Image (cartoon, grey):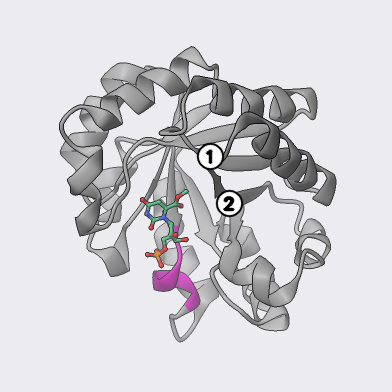
Amino acid sequence: MTELILSLDLCDRRQAASIAESCAPYIDAVKVGYPLVLSAGLGIVQDLAGLGLPLIADFKVADIPNTNRLICDAVFSAGFDAVIAHGFVGPDAVRTCVEVAHDRGGAVYVVAEMSHPGAVEFFHGGVAERIATLAVNCRADGIIAPATRPDRIGRLREIVGRRTIYSPGVGTQGGDIDTVAGLVDGVIVGRSIYEAEDPAAEAKLLSRIRR
Ligand code: O7M
């Protein structure tokens, strides 16, 4: 089954909670990042906890090991189930995130390659492959790979094997959900759902990938 993960990049706490609640029957997890937490506060985690869905903290953690530890401790204390970290900071920094997450029964996903056009500037030429290898070596639970470049997902899958691949970039960014769904473990969708006239109906439509 391919998971459908709602990227809740809204800045209004009530609207975010309401959209998440209406989409809940059709999604498998909710990803929360800086836009929502910085606008609505960490209390949004409690608002979303009642959905009974895993909550993924997309803070793209990218600091020295000690700071990564402090960030990840705070993430799991707040009630998140998983955290997303950058890999370019190196193995000690990623391992720290993994240690904290696994101590808390949580998961870490490492960004291997990003979905926007400018990502090719630094991620191509072998860097994404090295980050994916690092994610495996650091015992991360999976990676993030771009739905906008399905060929790259294939290449990164060769490296991470059965580890989880979550993939953003479908819909608004141009990736095709049906193409990508067969290649990954979960598809991350934001604007195509929360900007739709009827977000729940759109989530239901996209939830065909869960079959
Ligand atoms: O569907 P969208 O384009 O509205 O939203 C996509 C979400 O995925 C949004 O929260 C982005 O910040 C995030 N994302 C990408 O779009 N591209 C990436 O390469 C990586 C991420 C991401 O989630 O990283 C963990």
Ligand 1 image position (quadrant): bottom left
- What x and y, as percent, mark residue 118? 21, 56
Residue 149 can be seen, yes or no: no
Q: Give, as a single range, the part of the protein colored magenta.
A: 189-194
> Which quadrant does the C terminus fall into?
top left
- What x and y, as percent, mark residue 163? 46, 22
Which sits earlier in the primary sequence, circle 1 or circle 2? 2
Work out whether 193 lies above or below 143: below
Q: Amino acid type of disc 1?
A: Ala
Residue at the extreme bottom of the image, as rendered: 197
Tag 1, which secondary structure? Answer: strand
Residue at horizontal 34%, vertical 40%? Answer: 145
Magenta run includes residue 107: no
- The residue singled out by tag 1 in the image is 85
Estimate the spatial distance between the alpha carbons at disc 1 and disc 2, rounded to whole Å: 7 Å
Badge 2 density bin: few <14, some 14–19, many ≥20, Cα 10 Å: some
Pointers 1 and 2 in contact (CB under 8 A)? yes
- The residue singled out by tag 2 in the image is 59
